[in-house]
Image (cartoon, rainbow, N blue to C red):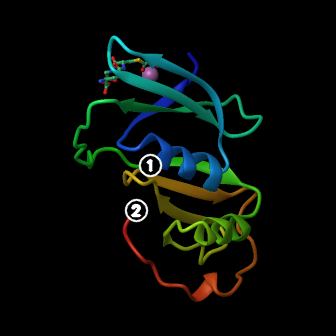
C-alpha cells in the first residue's frame, strides 16, 4: 500500500494556493475541474518529493467547514526552519508555534489547517528571536 494524499477542503482556492505554493513552497502537480460536481481538485507536493500530496478540494458553491477536532496536522521536513519561518512571517503567515527549540514550528492555512514544520536532521542551535518568542496561537 502507498500513501497518496491528504484531502483538505478550502473556501478560497487562490488564497490557499498562495499559502501552500507561494508561502509554504509546494508545487502544483495536477488539477482536475469537475463541472458535474461543481468542484476543483488541485494536487500539491513538496518539490521533488514523491512521498505524498495534499489534495485541495474547492467546492464552487460556498460551504462552511467546521474544524474537525480529530484532524491534527500535515507535516513537512524543511532545510532551515528559521529561514522558512522568517519567509512565512514576511509573507504574512502567523507562526503560531515558533521554532524555539530549532526543530518544530506550526502555522495554519487560510482555512485553519494546521501545518507542522520539522527541521531536517534534527534541531538547529537556538537562535533569536525564535528562541525567546512566545506562542501566538494554537495548532
Ligand atoms: C480523486 C480522488 O483523490 C478524490 O478524492 S475525489 C473524491 C470525491 N471528492 C469530491 O466529490 C469533491 C467534492 C465534494 N463536494 C467534497 O467536498 O468532497 C469524494 O468522494 N469526496 C467525498 C469525501 O468525503 O472525500
Ligand atoms: Ni482524494
Q: In which quarter of the image is residue 8?
A: top left
- Residue 56 in percent (x, y) is at 46, 34
Residue 88 lies left or right of residue 64; in this view the side is right
Q: Which mark is residue 135?
A: none
Ligand 1 under 8 Å from disc 2 Cβ = no
Q: Which mark is residue 73?
A: 1
Q: Foreground: 30 or 1? A: 30
Rounded to the nearest angstrom, the CA distance separating label 2 from label 1 is 8 Å
Q: Residue at x 33, y 20 (%)?
A: 38
Q: Which residue is drawn at 63% across and 58% down?
A: 118
How many marks do you count on the picture? Answer: 2
Q: In this view, does 106 lie above or below 11?
A: below
Q: Is residue 47 above or below residue 92?
A: above
Lower position in the chain sequence, tag 2 or tag 1: 1
Secondary structure found at label 1: loop
Q: Which residue is tagged 2?
A: 139
Ligand 1's quadrant is top left
Quarter the N terminus occupies: top right
Q: Is residue 125 above or below residue 106?
A: below
Q: In which quarter of the image is residue 27?
A: top right
- Residue 111 in percent (x, y) is at 37, 51
Secondary structure found at label 2: loop
Q: Which residue is drawn at 29% across and 45% down?
A: 70
- Residue 104 in percent (x, y) is at 59, 65
Q: Residue at x 39, y 32 (%)?
A: 58
Amino acid at each position: 500500500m502507498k500513501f497518496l494524499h491528504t484531502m483538505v477542503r478550502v473556501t478560497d482556492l487562490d488564497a490557499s494556493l498562495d499559502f501552500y505554493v507561494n508561502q509554504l513552497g509546494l508545487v502544483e502537480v495536477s488539477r482536475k475541474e469537475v463541472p458535474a460536481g461543481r468542484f476543483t481538485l488541485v494536487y500539491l507536493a513538496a518539490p521533488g518529493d514523491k512521498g505524498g500530496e495534499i489534495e485541495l478540494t474547492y467546492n464552487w458553491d460556498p460551504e462552511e467547514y467546521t474544524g474537525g477536532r480529530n484532524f491534527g496536522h500535515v507535516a513537512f521536513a524543511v532545510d532551515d526552519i528559521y529561514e522558512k519561518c522568517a519567509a512565512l512571517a514576511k509573507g504574512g503567515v502567523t507562526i503560531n508555534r515558533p521554532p524555539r527549540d530549532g526543530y518544530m514550528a506550526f502555522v495554519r492555512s487560510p482555512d485553519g489547517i494546521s501545518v507542522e514544520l520539522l527541521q531536517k536532521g534534527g534541531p538547529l542551535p537556538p537562535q533569536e528571536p525564535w528562541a525567546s518568542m512566545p506562542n501566538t496561537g494554537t495548532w
